[in-house]
Image (cartoon, helix red, strand yellow):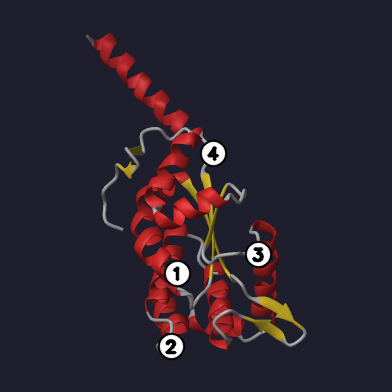
Amino acid sequence: MQSVLFAATVVVALATISANSIEPLKVSVYYESHCPDSRDFIMTQLHPHFCKVQQYLDLNLVPFGKAYSSDKGFVCQHGPKECRGNTIHNCVLKRINNSKAQVDYVNCAMYDPEYPGHIEKTCVEESGVDVEQVKACYTSEEGYQMMLKAETETKNMTPGPLFVPTIVFDDKYNLGDQNQAFANFESTLCKKLVSHGHVNVCSNGVIVNRQTC
């Protein structure tokens, strides 16, 4: 009997080691700070599901979208307020090392980006980042350079982008994946995780871990 229990323990241990050795699924979300579609995706799909599978993911959040740089600075799809918001998001995300905390900040910031102080103070304080550091970043060369970096990555990793938010898996843009992920992020995430070898994370396109994020 003891030998059977030992064998079962070994099997479970090996399965755990095997699961932990699988490369994480990289998920990049190219979004905009004042974009309604970005808001809906982050608040109703990314934030509710991320914490349930965060150990299997390598999340990359890039706030820039359909903006572009010019000799006078940046031009953004939803105006100067969005350029300011994108810069603030970049400055905050750089100062948060934990992916779950990054998602929490962006979710908070998307809730009411028009309210004075919401994205650069209230949500920053909730994330534990120093407000004055963020202000020094988004009003200086540091914030400008971060926007240039976000622009380069966005244009290199997406076809434009044509739509915001753009969701990219493992650094390979695919229109089918994009459409499926925007329509039903959970089921698309499950399909991708299973293809990565994380076969016990989902059941019939639904994440097994039902905890509330």
Q: Residue at x 36, y 34 (%)?
A: 200
Q: Residue at x 41, y 84 (%)?
A: 118
Quadrant in which residue 213 is drawn: bottom left
Measured in 3D between alpha carbons, the distance from the residue under mark 1 to the one under mark 3, in whole angstroms, is 16 Å
Q: Above or below — where is 90 with respect to 132? A: above
In the displayed image of the protein, which residue is found farthest to the bottom? 116
What residue type is disc 2 on?
Answer: Gly
Give the percent coordinates (x, y) of residue 59.
51, 55
Q: Above or below — where is 171 with respect to 94? A: above
Q: Residues within 10 Å of mark 2 (few under 14, many from 20)?
A: few
Report whether residue 48 is seen.
yes
Res 160 label: 3
Query: Which element is circle 4 on?
Result: loop
What residue type is disc 3 on?
Answer: Gly
Query: 109 or 10, which lies in front?
Result: 109
First in sequence, mark 4 or 2: give its number. Answer: 4
First in sequence, mark 1 or 4: give its number. Answer: 4
Res 23 label: 4
Measured in 3D between alpha carbons, the distance from the residue under mark 4 to the one under mark 2, in whole angstroms, is 39 Å
Which circle, 2 or 1, is nearer the viewer? 1
